[in-house]
Amino acid sequence: MEKQILYNPLNTAEKIKYRAKTQNVIIKDMLVELELGSNTMSNMRHGRAIASDSLARIADYLDCSIDYLMGRTDNPDINR
């Protein structure tokens, strides 16, 4: 059985960037408001995972599901 990769930090960073743009959110401002490090996005772009609670806070801030940010669904709505 082939192992399925369920989390790709680079793809998640791109989804966050896209969702922020559609919500007119400046990523730097979002990270400050969420008290996340300024290198959070850079770390993901370099393949490093972020903490699950940080990802959950970003999803809440961007009003979308974690599954959407992780690429598990194309539907950003929390309640399908």
Image (tube, helix red, strand yellow):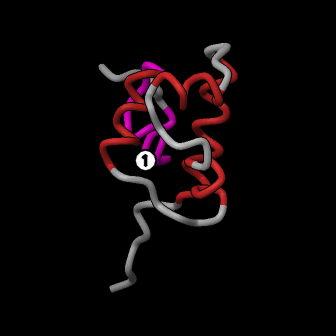
In this rendering, the answer to whether 48 lies above or below 64 is below
Quarter the C terminus occupies:
top left
Image location (x, y in percent) of residue 14: 65, 44
Q: Secondary structure at mark 1?
A: loop
Quarter the N terminus occupies:
bottom left
Quarter-wise, where is residue 16 in the image? top right
- Give the labeled residue for mark 1: 72
Residue at 52% in and 61% down: 8
Q: Say which of 25 and 29 sits in front.
A: 29
Q: Is residue 6 left or right of residue 20?
A: left
Residue at 44% in and 28% down: 34
Q: Is residue 19 left or right of residue 73?
A: right
Image location (x, y in percent) of residue 45: 66, 57
Predominant secondary structure in magenta?
loop
Residue 51 magenta? no
- The magenta segment is 62-74
